Image (cartoon, coloured by chain):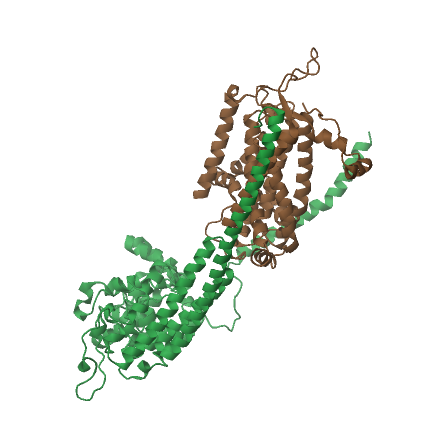
Chain colours: A green, B brown
Amino acid sequence: MNALPRSADQAIRVIRPVLLAAALVGLGLVLVQAVAAADPTPAPSAGPSAPPAPGASAAAPAQESCLTCHAAIDNTQHDITEQWKISVHGQNGIGCASCHGGDPTSDEVTVAMSTSAGFIGKPDRTMAVSVCGDCHSNVERMRQYQLPTDQLSKYRTSVHGQRLLTVQDTRVAICTDCHGVHDVKKASDPTAPVFPLNVPKLCASCHADATLMKPYDIPTDQYQIYETSVHGQALLVDQDMRAPTCASCHGSHDAKPPQSSEVVGVCGKCHTATQALYEQSRHSRLDVGPKCWTCHGTHDVVKPDESRFFHPNPPEIDCTTCHNPGDRTLILSADRFTNDTDRRCDTCHHETSILYSQAEGIRAALDRANAAYQSAEERIGEAAAAGMIVSDADVTLSEAKTSLIRGRAEVHTTKLSAVAALTDVATAKAAEAQAFADAKLQESASRREAMVIVLAIIMVNIVALFLLRRGIHHDEGPAAP
Amino acid sequence: MATPEAPITQGGRLSDWFEERLHARELFAALLHVRIPAEARTYYLGGITLFLFGVQVVTGTLLTLYYKPTPDTAFDSVKYITSVVEFGWLIRSVHHWAANLMIIFLVLHVVRIFVQGAYKYPRELTWIMGIGLLGVTIGFGFTGYLLPWDQRAFWASVVGTEIAGGVPLIGPALLELLRGGADVTEATLGRFFGMHILVLPLLLGAFLVAHLLIVHQTGLASPKRPTPRPRAAAPGGDAQNEPLKPFFPNYVLDEVIAWAAMLAMLVVLASVMPAGLEAKANPLETPPHVKPEWYFLAAYQLLKVVPRDVGILAPMVGIALLGLLPFLDRNPEVRARKRPLALLMGAVVAVAVVGLSVWGYYS
């Protein structure tokens, strides 16, 4: 009878501290919640001496009042508020007043949008540049975002900026044409129009428009040409972010076509090694000498090969094609290189000239190395198809390829000896690789010969066994399966 | 049916010398001098599989002399075997081809037993041992495939172990057990090698001895008449009137001829299509088309077209059902023509497996 109450008592004694602890924890949680509700200000992120965040001081309570009314006006205004919210400005608390002025703290339209409060309404195209520039050229303001502040000064040097600021041509591109208005996104955002993969389309949105470009008398086919070039294919088809966009060569805020004299530096920004080789050449030392574009073109750069040396039939040229009749100085007319098929050594160098034979020598050296490489590659393929392990040959062949690639690049020095030094290595390595492959093929052939002999021996055995079998079955009776 | 036949004859002096010490003549006579049904049609498939296993033991032992089972050395040692060691290419290529042929002939052997109804009473144990041998042989293929440690080997093993990881409930544990960790690494290579050269050979040896002993005890099946069950009324059965022929030397000689032909085939395959080697395994670079070995293609393709659990469980359940076949198919009839349902079901399974494999190959 006593057992039950006693055990219940024991149970209560055990449970009591647990219940007490649970009650205390619950009370603590309630208190924490209450304190959090009473104090809505977040913990300070910086000390009291930290300078106020730019824009944010007016922004945080400010947009509330602008958005409250503007989101309700009509669909357009509503959309603008929505765009702003997800924009890089909206995300960082840069409010309406930062660009439009006015007093965002007031919910009275006459106060909030009064000119005395600095309200400027919709800035015109000229003003827009300085509105953006006001913040974006301010080092103090931009420091926290780690953004450059030279966009405005660069823009002033660009064709766009110069036309806007000197002749008030408002048709040229301004900040908002490329970055958007209320929906500005970071340049690293893949959906931003200024994201590298989107840049060619962005530039083309104006530059491929014949109506827009008519007053400037400039071509509108750059995008179309670029699209098929080795650069355009790499960027647009392969989505290779290393490939140049329009901005890589022309600049973005400082957009301007590079001058002929600047081209080597522009291409050399990526093609560093080739630039170094070119600078060893006689071409680079001429005032009016051939530059990258002379042989490779501009928007229409294609993958170069050995056909780039000569025309199938040498063109008609005489001294005055390239030299001033008077002082014999060089002339390099861009028109002669418009067509890709005319970007050849013999466009300038006459077939009877010494320099032509130098070019011939370079071409022959490359051809020899190429032929040796291809022959070795083919032979290695045969050996591999015969099931042989050709990794030694592959390694040697890749060494040949390295020398061949370097030899081809060396063409930019225009020095036969320099090219030949590398193509000779390539030819020798290719021959070595081919010898490996030949040995493998030879081994494969010997294996097959040996196979025939072994097969013959096995066949003899089988025949002998059949004869033995016939003897046994003759003695024993019915045939086996 | 396995009836000891010829009397133990006297041999030469050397033979007698051994006989006095081993008393082996009687044993060999019991093993070899038996009679088998004259109508038995084995097509030598089981014997050929046995021969190929023998080839694997010999070539595998030779390969082990040079092979080094660590990720740093495995690929180079296989390359060394294939390109430097005298006749290394031949040994490795024969090992490679005999492995493939062994699976082919094992499957053909199973098909023959199925069509001839030779798994029925009293050969249920032979059949179960045979299915065990099939499993162990596939295990050999699975573990051996990784050993060259080239790209193909590595990634096929990644895919293969991944499939094992999908088994419901025990999958993650099984995956870790197979790989020796979360990924295919040195630990995986070590245990695959250990399995391949020690565990599986012992297992296969045990299954094989049991399989052959039971074959010896029950004798070869006749494809025309079932082995009668002993009846109280007629103890001793009624198969005595069946025509018989000697196992040795008649049948053995035929088998040896088949083995010689198989050896010729191995020589041709190894010479014309020697075992290759891809680039060294790179765990960071997945090749575009990773596929398992051909004998796993059906399971691989099934996994792609049915829900994951079904795709993983179906082959396992299939193998289990195959093992239990003698107990599921209680029809005593052995003649193929009189078992249309069994043959039809077998044909459906065969077409499905071949179809899935071909689909998997071209997918």
Frontmost residue, B339 versus B271: B271
Q: Residue furthest top?
A: B233
Locate residue B312: give its quadrant: top right
Q: Is residue A369 left or right of residue A469?
A: left
Q: Is residue B108 left or right of residue B69?
A: left
Query: Which residue appears at 71% of the width and 25% of the height?
Result: B5
Label count reads 0
Quadrant assignment for the N terminus of chain B: top right
Frontmost residue, A127 versus B63: B63
Above or below, A209 against B311 in this view is below
Q: State the image coordinates of residue B97 (x, y, percent, origin top left).
A: 55, 45
Quadrant assignment for the C terminus of chain B: top left
Frontmost residue, B292 versus A33: B292
Q: Is residue B106 visible?
A: yes
Q: State the image coordinates of residue B131 (x, y, percent, origin top left).
A: 61, 33
Q: Residue furthest bottom?
A: A327
Q: State the image coordinates of residue B101 (x, y, percent, origin top left).
A: 55, 41
Q: Is residue B127 left or right of residue B292?
A: right
Above or below, B292 against A296 in this view is above
Q: State the image coordinates of residue B247 (x, y, percent, origin top left).
A: 65, 29
Locate residue A172: give its quadrant: bottom left
Q: Is residue A106 visible?
A: no
Locate residue A365: give its quadrant: bottom left
Frontmost residue, B106 versus B254: B254
Q: Is residue A71 left or right of residue A393?
A: left
